[in-house]
Image (cartoon, rainbow, N blue to C red):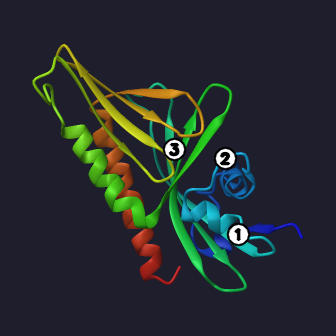
Amino acid sequence: MKKLILILLAAAGLVSTADADSSFPDALMIASTQTNYPVKTAYEQFARVPGAVLVGGWSRVGTLSDGVSFPVDVKVVRLTNMETSNHVYAIVLITSYPNYAQYDYIDSDELDGFIHGTQLVSRIAHPISSTDDSAASYITKGGFLIMKFSSGGNAVAQLKSARNQERNTLEASSLDKLTDLLNTAKANIQGLIQNGG
């Protein structure tokens, strides 16, 4: 039996129809149909429950576009299993490469560690050790990697998905902007949970 995924926007109360991104249902579909990658996040596991009717909703948080090679959209996503009424929340980082968009999911229970790790990587300054060059990194359980390199007094950061070899290079200061977007996403998820959504 094929899984039926229903996308409810205004009815779900997550987004207004004016705020809806018509291309974003792909993020919900990709989580449920990307079988060529190992499932590492609870969100992706939940999205692949066979024979279940799932209701998905999302809210746009913002875009990291300044000082970055490829823009990264940050969105809050929620899936509800209609039969069990169980919910799962996550954020999705959508990196827009020239020929495709890469979707990386961060589970809501991993968000505090992801924010803290991003802050620590951002704050590390050269020299980290007595070596000439240094690097710091943080990786999520889904394999999304944040790195900061320092060489000769210059620092650069990169974001990388576990699902491809592309590296999204950004100015080191852009990690602070990413942290702000992640904190906003966390607040949005907490608001949804508190309001029973």
The residue closer to the viewer here, 184 or 41, is 41
Query: Residue 96 location, x and y as percent?
Result: 58, 34
* Residue on which the image places disc 1: 8
Residue at the disc numbered 2: 37
Q: Are marks 3 and 2 in contact (CB under 8 Å)?
A: no
Name the residue carrying label 3: 73
Q: Which element carries disc 1, helix, strand or loop? A: loop
Amino acid at pointer 3: Asp
Q: Amino acid at mark 2?
A: Tyr
The residues bearing labels 1 and 2 have C-alpha atoms spaced at a distance of 27 Å
User: Where is 84 relative to 183, above or below?
Assistant: below
Which dot, 3 or 2, sits closer to the camera? 2
Q: Amino acid at mark 1?
A: Leu
Is residue 68 positioned above or below 28 on the image?
above
Between discs 3 and 1, the one toward the N terminus: 1
**Mark 3 or mark 2, earlier in chain:** 2
- Disc 1 crowd rating (10 Å Cα; few below 14, some 14-19, many 20+) is some
Helix, strand or loop under label 3: strand
* Residue 13 or residue 75, whichever sits in front: 75
| Cα distance between the residues tagged 3 and 1 | 20 Å
